[in-house]
Image (tube, coloured by chain):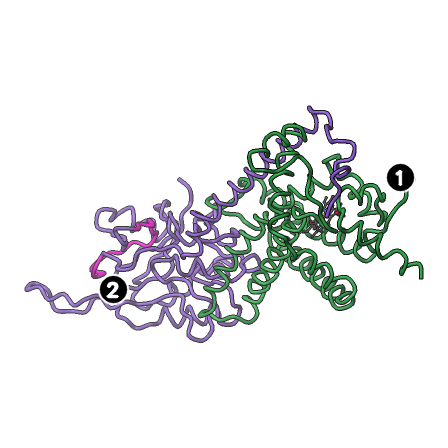
Amino acid sequence: MSSRQVPRHTRAGIFIHWFNAACWFFLLVTGVALISNPELNPLGAWYPKAVRAIFFGGENLLVAHWLVAFIWLAVWLVYLFWGMNRLVAPFINSIFTIEPNRDIQWMIKKNLQMTVGYKMMARLVKPLGYDGTMPDQGYYNVGQKLAAQGLIIGGLALVGTGFIMFTSKYFLTAADVWLVQWSITVHFIAAGVTTALLILHIYMAAISSEERPAFISMFTGTVPAEYAKHHHRLWYDELEDSKPSEVG
Amino acid sequence: MAKQLGMVIDANACIDCKGCMVACKVANQVPGDNWRNWIKDGAMDRSAKSKKRMVFQPGNCMQCDKPTCVTACPTGATYKSKADGVVMINRDLCIGCGQCIKACPYGARYRNEKLKVADKCDFCSNRREVGLEPACVSTCPTKARAFGDLNDPSSPAGKLYAAQKEEAVQVVNAQSDTDPNIYYLGAPGDKHWPVKAQMPSAFTFWKNVADPGVKVLMGLMGVGVLAMLGKQLVMKNDAPEEHHGEDGHE
Ligand code: HEM
């Protein structure tokens, strides 16, 4: 009974997630190695040296970086147009819908629970007038929503500034290069912020034991109904409510 | 001593014919309004003992020992060659951001109108490869420019430099001495270069704000994740059986 599965991710969604993750990883590894300046190196001089050696030179590394970026962008554009109504719009809608009262409480409790456990959390939130239960969450909890918002905004910033940098050698004139200079800096900041978010995202998804069923669902597409009920109650209720019509 | 190509320029010999500028433009296919070298008019010497002649100061990239253009380059596309001390540009690695152009106090760099990358004098690397001197040196009718390894007394520039170390001057800005490798003899005019080397604001913001900011953010996230990992490893899962259970929901 507890092994009843409910659908969570479509095949297209699973594809775009892992395609995106693979590209993102490649772009991060190659992008950091495109910085080679003693005053700016994020990891030290050895890093660009080593990665550039693998690519037989910094100039090839640069081409590899923007080539993968363009493939990534092209696949995303196809996905966005093809899945706009059915997949993308509902996703954006749910990611950007936040209910402050409920969600602030959830964030406080979740952070404590993840670091000091349920019992201690229950004790610590008492002065705030909260009990020890987690407020119900929808298809995504607010932690996932905030992370996704950051990744989407960061991703757009990366695309925009990356495109400006790319155009520099083809279209821009000497009067426009200030735009390229600030694009580099903003590109770096966006990459830094999204990487910080991804450290958390990957920990929650792949390492934290509580979210194991969600991790598996990013391959199989389904989660156990029990998991949906405990972690995404509002979504679970919607699923249950819509059941009869689904059958019909 | 390491090889350091440079020039020793006799300003008194320069007659402002602009031959070096034309020869350079042709030899290096420098497009449109771009120029790799120049001849500045020095102020007229009006002191009593002077013969009231104009002074000229020919110049080009000074292949500095402390090149601010290299400091400003984020990708390492511009670098000081270890082999001969010339500041070079890898055009394929250059992304055309123009930070080096702004960072050079001498205005020696330009954005190549055709190639749309940073460009400048490299002492005619194409000509040196086949054993020729830089075009400006070869063409100069009064032999105002001497070229070669400054540390080798048998090269034309090295010979002059060794012989007249005391008189040879660099033209620098006192606030940003980049230690250039062009030395002047004679009367090159004002030794003080009026423009100070300046990093572009996007670069200083990156270095002073964005870089430490991202590091702090990364550190905070790392500490948070380690705390959660530690808790997961050390503490048993103390989740209540039905943590939504009895109170239900609205
Ligand atoms: C090893 C790397 C990664 C793993 C293991 C991973 C895992 C997951 C899992 C399991 C989910 C589903 C969560 C659920 O169903 O509740 C998910 C969702 C998501 N992933 Fe990833 N992911 C990875 C990398 C990335 C990267 C690189 C990005 C984007 C830059 C990304 C963006 C997202 C977004 C936007 C969502 C949906 C909303 C959210 O959970 O925040 N993921 N990921």
Residue A242 relative to residue B145: left or right: right
User: Which residue is labeled 2 in the image?
Assistant: B13
- The majority secondary structure of the magenta stretch comes to loop
User: Which residue is labeled 1 in the image?
Assistant: A2
Residue B42 position, x and y percent, is 22, 66
Vertical placement of residue A168 versus A187, above or below: below
* Residue plotted at (48% across, 54% down): B78
* Mark 2 nearby-residue class (10 Å; few <14, some 14–19, many ≥20): some
* Residue plotted at (86% across, 47% down): A220
Residue B129's tag is none
Vertical placement of residue B230 versus A100, above or below: above
Whether residue A220 is visible to the viewer of this picture, yes or no, is yes
Give the SS element for disc 2.
helix
Q: Magenta residues?
A: B176-191
Identify the image quadrant of the C terminus of chain A: bottom right
Chain coloured green in this rendering: A
Residue B130 position, x and y percent, is 51, 59
Q: Quadrant of residue A158?
A: bottom right
Q: Are both tags, 2 and 1, on one chain?
A: no
- Queried whether the magenta region covers residue B179, the answer comes back as yes
